[in-house]
Image (cartoon, rainbow, N blue to C red):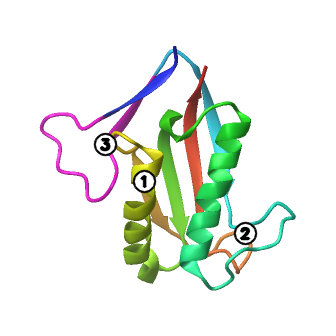
Amino acid sequence: MAEVRYENPKGTAPAQGLYSHAGVAHGGRIAFIAGQLSVDAGGAVVGRNDFAAQFRQVFENLGDVLAGMGVGFDRVAKFTTYMVHSQDIDAFMVLRKELFPSLFKDGVYPPNTLLMIDRLVKEDFLIEVEAVAVLD
């Protein structure tokens, strides 16, 4: 059976947020999930100028992609997060702290790389999250 295990090897510095240093995949195919944006089913931007609304929509969209592949967030081996405003980092940390316990029941979280970039594909987007997941 495919699974993902999160690790913080001995001798490593403590994680600086809700993530682990490594995600180890076992027994399944690897899916590389494109960065998800804050769009609804019709393609309209959700939460224009509202970081929290965009964060929630992005993770809802990620959940939809995972479900469409027959898995859940427990199969995510790694996230990469792109944001356009460093001023949103604190909000990002708070929103993850609210959301992640419901997605990762054991309280151990996948690795995440957080990057600040100039912009995303459209000016309206504030956050994009891509993932690597393990499928059966």
Q: Position of residue 126 (x, y in %)?
A: 60, 75
> Could you tell whether 73 is left or right of 23 in the image?
right
Numbered badge on residue 44: none
First-in-chain label (3 vs 2) = 3
Residue 90 showing in the rendered view:
yes
The residue positioned 50% from the left and 80% from the top of the image is 85
Reading the image, the residue beneath label 2 is 121
| Crowdedness near tag 2: few (<14), some (14–19) or many (≥20) residues, C-alpha within 10 Å | few
Residue 21 part of the magenta-drawn span:
yes
Reading the image, the residue beneath label 3 is 21
Q: Position of residue 116 (x, y in %)?
A: 48, 70
Q: From the viewer's side, name the closer residue of 7 and 120.
A: 7
First-in-chain label (3 vs 1) = 3
In whole angstroms, how far apart are the C-alphas of marks 3 and 1? Answer: 16 Å
Magenta stretch, residue numbers: 7-25
The residue positioned 56% from the left and 78% from the top of the image is 51
Residue 118 showing in the rendered view:
no
User: Marks 1 and 3: in contact by CB < 8 Å?
Assistant: no
The residue positioned 82% from the left and 72% from the top of the image is 44
Residue 123 drawn above or below residue 60 = below
Which amino acid, mark 1?
Phe
Q: Secondary structure at mark 1?
A: helix
Reading the image, the residue beneath label 1 is 100
Residue 63 drawn above or below residue 67 = below
- Overall secondary structure of the magenta stretch? loop
Indicate which label's residue lies in the foreground, 2 or 1.
1
Q: Secondary structure at mark 3?
A: loop
The residue positioned 52% from the left and 19% from the top of the image is 2
